[in-house]
Image (cartoon, rainbow, N blue to C red):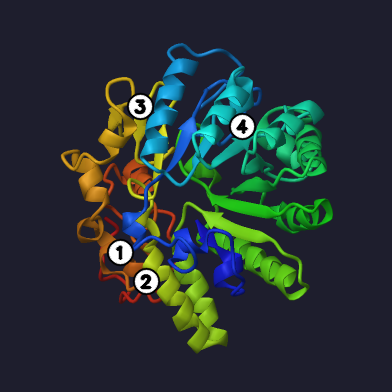
Amino acid sequence: MVNLTKLFCGAAQPADALRYGHGHGAPTSAAARRPIVVWNITRTCNLRCVHCYSDSYAKPYEGELTGAEAKTVLDDISAFKVPAVLFSGGEPLARPDLLDLIAYAVAKGLRVTLSTNGTLIDEAVAAKLKANNLTYVGISLDGIGPTNDQFRGVEGAFDRAVRGFRNCMAVGQKVGLRLTLTKRNCQDLHQIFDFIEKEGIQRACFYHLVYSGRGNAADELTNAEIRGALDIILERTEDFHKRGIEKEILTVDNHVDNAYIYLKLRERDPAYADKVYQWMKWNGGGANSSGVGISNIDTQGNVHPDQFWQTAILGNVRERPFSQIWTDNKITLLRHLRNRRPLLKGRCSSCRFQEICGGSFRVRAAQVHHDPWAPDPACYLTDEEIGIPAGTISAS
């Protein structure tokens, strides 16, 4: 994650210690962090989102971890001292025992967050989430009104998600908005920021598209469109900050954003840009994300480097604990992900922003080029910007 409110505006943020290495509880290095566990607790979902990386539908799926098995995993990751577990799906609230698992995880001392489409959060569910001391609820909203409904594949999904936001806010449950940037919804960005302000939503995460499951590269923005979207997001983030409206605005799944922010800051305040560069360098970008600071457990218990890389199976929690899998340096992909920079190819290998981008998101390279060390196809910077003379580096 790239915290725009922190980097672009200089405002202190809740996860500065974990993300940028300063503040109470900061680890010795980003590489030394325990991973956040993204856990797809069920594949079942009541919507049909066009970009769904788990390719979920409104039906039951066989082989999902039982409640007892899930609690055994929670025992292990609690003892392993992961910083947080994020229950995702499918739609996690479609799983009947989700609230029980949340309560169990919190009782084990875990920081628990929820990724949901929000449509199942009625007043009673919102109250139960708050009562179970859930840290944060992230609700996906991929546009305003019809844009969101078309994206979600179900008419009325927007109104039901808005109800979910409001029900959470009414009981004092911290809530955030999650949006995936595609050709289908970028025209709604200003309206999304208006919505965030009007509804009092505390946090927003703007995800770059990952080509996994139903996520299709055909929906990807052009380089110019990505830059235009980032410019709007940065403009509106800075506007919130200048008006004293406290929000946490982040982008996710493309660490090229670090370099883009740095270049923009250099134009206005080189000294501050250099300070921000050091924060980014400590973070390491993609070099400390998949397989290091982020992990995934799927519905069947398989462990992956991140939630989008379902083709890379590192082990299964039914066979041995997550903590043992994650610390097994004999697993080749894990070992390589933890020292990936020497393996990068093409433009990524010679980029002057390697230490703040880290090769960005390796799963996109694997999906497009069938090589996890090839350049991230979602890099939107020019050869000149990354310090490569035009035409001197091959694409892969």
Q: Which residue is mark 2?
A: 383
Three-letter code for the amino acid on which mark 1 is drawn = Arg
Q: Which residue is mark 1?
A: 347
Q: Residues within 10 Å of mark 1 (few under 14, many from 20)?
A: many
Residue drawn at x 36%, y 53% is 33
Where is residue 238 shown, x and y percent of the image?
68, 72
- Judged from the image, the secondary structure of the residue bearing numbered disc 2 is loop
Q: Residues within 10 Å of mark 2 (few under 14, many from 20)?
A: some
Q: Of circles 2 and 4, which is in front?
A: 4
Residue drawn at x 34%, y 76% is 387
Three-letter code for the amino acid on which mark 2 is drawn = Asp
Q: Camera-side residue: 370 or 237?
A: 237
Residue drawn at x 78%, y 26% is 124
Where is residue 360 shown, x and y percent of the image?
38, 57
Nearer-N-terminus badge (4/1): 4
Where is residue 247 shown, x and y percent of the image?
69, 61
Q: Quadrant of the C terminus?
A: bottom left
Question: Mark 3 touching mark 2, by CB under 8 A?
Answer: no
Q: Which residue is mark 3?
A: 302
- Judged from the image, the secondary structure of the residue bearing numbered disc 3 is strand
From where the camera sits, is residue 91 visible? no
Question: Mark 1 touching mark 2, by CB under 8 A?
Answer: yes
Nearer-N-terminus badge (3/1): 3
Q: Of circles 3 and 1, which is in front?
A: 3
Q: Camera-side residue: 315 or 260?
A: 315
Q: Which residue is mark 4?
A: 49
Q: Of circles 4 and 1, which is in front?
A: 4
Image quarter of residue 8: bottom right
Q: Residues within 10 Å of mark 3 (few under 14, many from 20)?
A: some
Q: Residue furthest left?
A: 330
